[in-house]
Amino acid sequence: MESKIELSSADAVKTFPAFPVVLVAMGDEERNVFTVGLVQAFSFNPLILGIGVHPSRHSFKLLQNLADFSVNIPGKELVEQVLYCGTKSGRDTDKFKETGLTAVTGKKIKSPVIGECLVNFECKKSKVIEMGDRTWFCGEVVNIEAAKDYARDKGMLYWGGEFRMPGEVFRRR
Ligand SMILES: Cc1cc2nc3c(=O)[nH]c(=O)nc-3n(C[C@H](O)[C@H](O)[C@H](O)COP(=O)(O)O)c2cc1C
């Protein structure tokens, strides 16, 4: 067995290989979009997605007051928009206008989905869980649309300051 080193929690969290990165859009009259790496499926049937949000985000306040939001999977070509939405706040900027991302009216929710993304999940907020420095907004998925040519390896991954694409399949179950 290899000898081990001790890590701080700040360094240890960076040892995860990567997580999917998504764009979360919300709002009816006041719309916003922001980048989220903390996204998780909490249940498969029904499908429930959760996003971990820091209270300092403008989106946090919006999500508290809204009944729904959308989770959208961007492809590699949207990396600049993903960075923009993850570094600028909707408090000061209209991120849809600045990035050119298209807010498409949701089919079953009031919040928009993002036209350019590969997959759009429309979520109705079902549970809010405060945990440590993040609050998880969980939503039951009520409508899903995907690009016809969507494939799992077209979604972007992020962690520790690096954007990646999924790698090789080296074993099947
Ligand atoms: C790749 C990436 C992933 C991010 N993941 C999260 C996340 O999971 N949760 C979060 O609260 N903020 C996350 N952020 C930061 C927010 O997207 C960022 O603070 C954004 O400007 C907030 O926008 P808002 O103020 O309009 O809500 C991430 C940023 C980047 C670039």
Image (cartoon, rainbow, N blue to C red):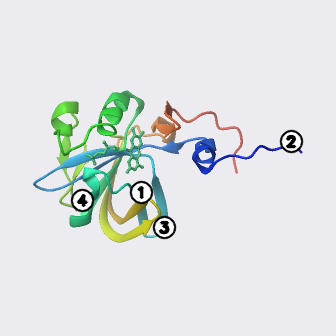
Binning the other alpha carbons within 10 Å of mark 3 as few (below 14), some (14 to 19) or many (20 upward) gives few
The secondary structure type at the circle numbered 1 is: strand
Q: Which is closer to the viewer, label 3 or label 1? A: 1
Binning the other alpha carbons within 10 Å of mark 2 as few (below 14), some (14 to 19) or many (20 upward) gives few
Instruction: Where is residue 63? Give x, y as percent.
Output: 26, 60
* Alpha carbons under labels 4 and 3: distance apart: 25 Å
Q: Which residue is mark 1?
A: 52
- Badge number at residue 2: 2
For marks 4 and 2, give the CA distance.
46 Å
Asked whether the viewer can see residue 173, the reply is yes
Please count the marks in the image: 4
CB-based contact (under 8 Å), mark 3 and mark 1: no
Question: How far, Cα to Cα, is label 3 from label 2?
Answer: 36 Å
In the rendered structure, the answer to whether residue 108 lies left or right of residue 141 reads: left
Q: Nearer the viewer, residue 41 or 88?
A: 88
Mark 1: is the Cβ under 8 angstroms from ligand 1?
Answer: yes
Nearer the observer: mark 4 or 3; the answer is: 4
Gap in Å between the C-alphas at discs 3 and 1? Answer: 16 Å
Q: List the residue tagged with mark 3.
A: 43
On the picture, is 3 further left or further right than 159?
A: right
- The residue under label 4 is 61
Determine contact: label 1, label 4, CB under 8 Å. Answer: no
Establish if 125 lies above or below 93: below
Tag nearer the camera, 3 or 2: 2
Q: Is residue 67 visible?
A: no
Q: Real-space Cα distance between discs 1 and 4? A: 13 Å
State the residue in front, 151 or 62: 62
